[in-house]
Image: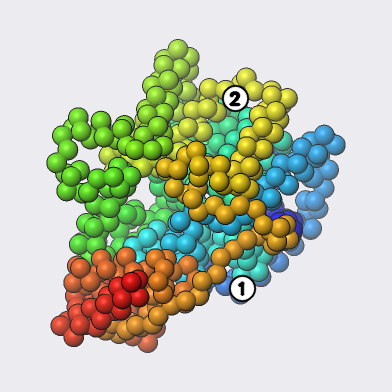
């Protein structure tokens, strides 16, 4: 907890300094501390994305970035902006920040933390963006811009990977600074994302901020559209946000094409990044085939697609069973899944229905555009993989639009207090959720409070692995554990290794002497098949 505070005190001035640089170049996203911080996040994320094509995001990148940010922070006396807070607002900010610091100090429990977030950060800090990295582990092909941002601060400033906790404190600053108190009501719920560098948290926070700016009448089309595209690059399921901003400025403010060039450039960079790491413009969709040698094997993509469909039904049906569903079965079974998932699905559809009625009653252009944007996003998600984690943000947006005008400061603080107590209790005593909501599986990985986390945030170590070689690739596999979060690189998780062998292919180094030249999928020779089968047998015997 104390060490997260130190990271926060260090990183926020750096981001403000970078925000000042961005404002000098392209103007204000919006005024204030939080405006500078968000501009800084945008600027440094894009710069590090470009840099990571060529070199790893190690301490040689982090230190100069920190020094430049601090230089502009002190040169422009940006610390004086903190004096704007009244005594009451400062106390409120302190309480909300301490709540975040405490929640962020718990052990990570989101499974993607171990199977996706940490391996991604390791590759970025040790090698940068690697061409064809999705051949090693398909999930690595995402390389979210948020993980690029986290990786750049992970060597020195934030070694415990609590950048999401810092973002929540920034969110608190925004709410208090803009006097828009409904954001305080959302903050306690988002504490559940504070222990891991999950991209779900920034896209929810950034979308709510942009939505608030649009409703408040912010007319900076260039930067708002650019930032909305930036949110899309963090998590493409946020497609509704750039659509909304585009519709708003085209049909209400009659903006010109020139004002969308910066956002379009960010989108182009996103496509290039994905083509470099995944082989296609948008992960994980195999659309826009450029015939690249490093694109994943079609059989591996097919397996991934089938898995996504099964995840839609919470793995309660096999792919073969789902294929036999009629249209009515698709809908009925999605609404009648065992456990909490079906309740979330029903609530999602009810929320859309309620919001459609609200839109019809209000008859306001901006609300209509919000509904159209969310509807487009919902259709896309339902068509590809209707997992609740892909439409969580919709709940926040609908609640914001419905209630932002009615929640006063006093009511918001009361809701913040009650919800904070509730979610801190869940984190501290996870037995509550494990007993009463057993179908909420991530709850079973919560461990509760330990006194050591008051000083240092809790983290896991495993560091047990076996080393193998197939063809020209020497790699490591976690010993008797399904994830490779602290396995030395190059590491392959057992599940993806099995998928590769089943497909008759295996990742190989494009240059056997240089990992940074990337990976290609190669059809195995008979000798390589024998080597791979020995690896499979070894893993299976270990699991026994």
Labelled disc at residue 317: none
Viewer-closest of 406 and 103: 103
Left or right: 39 as drawn, with respect to 222: right
Provide the secondary structure element on which disc 1 rests: helix
Closer to the N terminus: mark 1 or mark 2? 1
**Percent x, y of residue 168:** 63, 46
Left or right: 514 as drawn, with respect to 46: left
| Number of marks | 2
What residue is at 41 percent from the left and 34 percent from the top? 344
**In this view, which residue lies farthest toward the top?**
361
**Percent x, y of residue 259:** 49, 41
| Residue density around tag 2, few if under 14, some if 14–19, many if 20 or more, within 10 Å | some
**Percent x, y of residue 421:** 67, 38
| Residue density around tag 1, few if under 14, some if 14–19, many if 20 or more, within 10 Å | some
What residue is at 37 percent from the left and 60 percent from the top? 139
What residue is at 25 percent from the left and 30 percent from the top? 332
State whether residue 441 is above or below residue 455: above
Taking the image as drawn, is residue 70 in sight? yes
Left or right: 16 as drawn, with respect to 149: right
Left or right: 523 as drawn, with respect to 207: left
Taking the image as drawn, is residue 180 in sight? no
Viewer-closest of 332 and 197: 332
The image quadrant where one finds the C terminus is bottom left
The image quadrant where one finds the N terminus is bottom right
Viewer-closest of 115 and 86: 115
What residue is at 73 percent from the left and 61 percent from the top? 455
Task: Say whether marks 1 and 2 touch (CB < 8 Å).
Answer: no
The residue that mark 1 highlights is: 59
**Percent x, y of residue 195:** 58, 54
Labelled disc at residue 404: 2
Task: Using the numbered discs, state the Cα–Cα distance from disc 1 to disc 2 in whole angstroms.
Answer: 42 Å
Provide the secondary structure element on which disc 2 rests: loop
């Amino acid at each position: 907890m104390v060490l997260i505070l130190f990271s926060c005190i260090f990183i926020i001035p750096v981001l403000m300094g970078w925000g000042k640089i961005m404002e000098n170049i392209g103007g204000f996203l919006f005024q204030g501390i939080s405006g500078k911080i968000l501009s800084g996040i945008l600027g440094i994320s894009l710069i590090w994305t470009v840099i990571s094509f060529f070199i790893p995001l190690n301490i040689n990148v982090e230190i100069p970035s920190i020094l430049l940010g601090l230089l502009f922070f002190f040169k422009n006396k940006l610390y004086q902006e903190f004096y704007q807070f009244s005594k009451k607002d400062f106390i409120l900010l302190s309480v909300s920040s301490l709540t975040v610091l405490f929640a962020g100090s718990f052990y990570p429990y989101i499974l993607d933390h171990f199977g996706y977030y940490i391996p991604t950060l390791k590759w970025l800090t040790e090698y940068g963006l690697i061409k064809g990295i999705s051949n090693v582990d398909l999930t690595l092909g995402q390389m979210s811009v948020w993980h690029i941002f986290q990786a750049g601060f992970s060597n020195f400033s934030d070694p415990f990977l609590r950048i999401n906790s810092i973002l929540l404190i920034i969110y608190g600053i925004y709410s208090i600074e803009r006097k828009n108190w409904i954001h305080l009501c959302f903050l306690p719920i988002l504490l559940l994302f504070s222990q891991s560098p999950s991209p779900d948290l920034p896209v929810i926070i950034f979308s709510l901020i942009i939505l608030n700016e649009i409703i408040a009448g912010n007319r900076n089309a260039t930067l708002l559209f650019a930032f909305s595209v930036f949110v899309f690059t963090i998590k493409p399921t946020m497609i509704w946000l750039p659509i909304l901003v585009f519709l708003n400025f085209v049909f209400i403010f009659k903006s010109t094409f020139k004002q969308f060039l910066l956002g379009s450039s960010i989108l182009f960079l996103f496509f290039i990044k994905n083509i470099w790491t995944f082989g296609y413009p948008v992960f994980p969709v195999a659309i826009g085939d450029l015939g690249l040698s490093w694109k994943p094997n079609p059989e591996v993509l097919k397996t991934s697609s089938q898995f996504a469909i099964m995840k839609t039904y919470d793995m309660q049906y096999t792919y073969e069973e789902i294929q036999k569903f009629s249209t009515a079965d698709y809908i009925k079974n999605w609404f009648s899944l065992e456990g909490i998932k079906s309740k979330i699905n029903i609530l999602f559809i009810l929320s859309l229905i309620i919001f459609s009625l609200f839109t019809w009653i209000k008859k306001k252009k901006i609300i209509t555009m919000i509904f159209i944007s969310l509807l487009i996003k919902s259709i896309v998600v339902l068509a590809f993989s209707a997992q609740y984690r892909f439409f969580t943000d919709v709940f926040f947006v609908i609640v914001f639009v419905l209630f932002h005008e009615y929640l006063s400061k006093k009511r918001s603080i009361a809701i913040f207090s009650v919800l904070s107590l509730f979610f801190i209790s869940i984190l501290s005593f996870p037995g509550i959720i494990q007993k009463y909501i057993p179908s909420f599986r991530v709850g079973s990985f919560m461990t509760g409070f330990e006194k050591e986390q008051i000083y240092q945030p809790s983290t896991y170590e495993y560091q047990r692995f076996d080393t193998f070689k197939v063809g020209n690739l020497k790699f490591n596999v976690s010993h008797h554990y399904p994830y490779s979060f602290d396995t030395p690189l190059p590491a392959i998780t057992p599940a993806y290794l099995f998928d590769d062998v089943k497909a008759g292919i295996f990742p190989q180094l494009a240059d056997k002497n240089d990992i940074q030249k990337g990976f290609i999928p190669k059809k195995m020779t008979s000798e390589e098949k024998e080597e791979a089968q020995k690896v499979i047998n070894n893993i299976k015997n270990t699991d026994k």
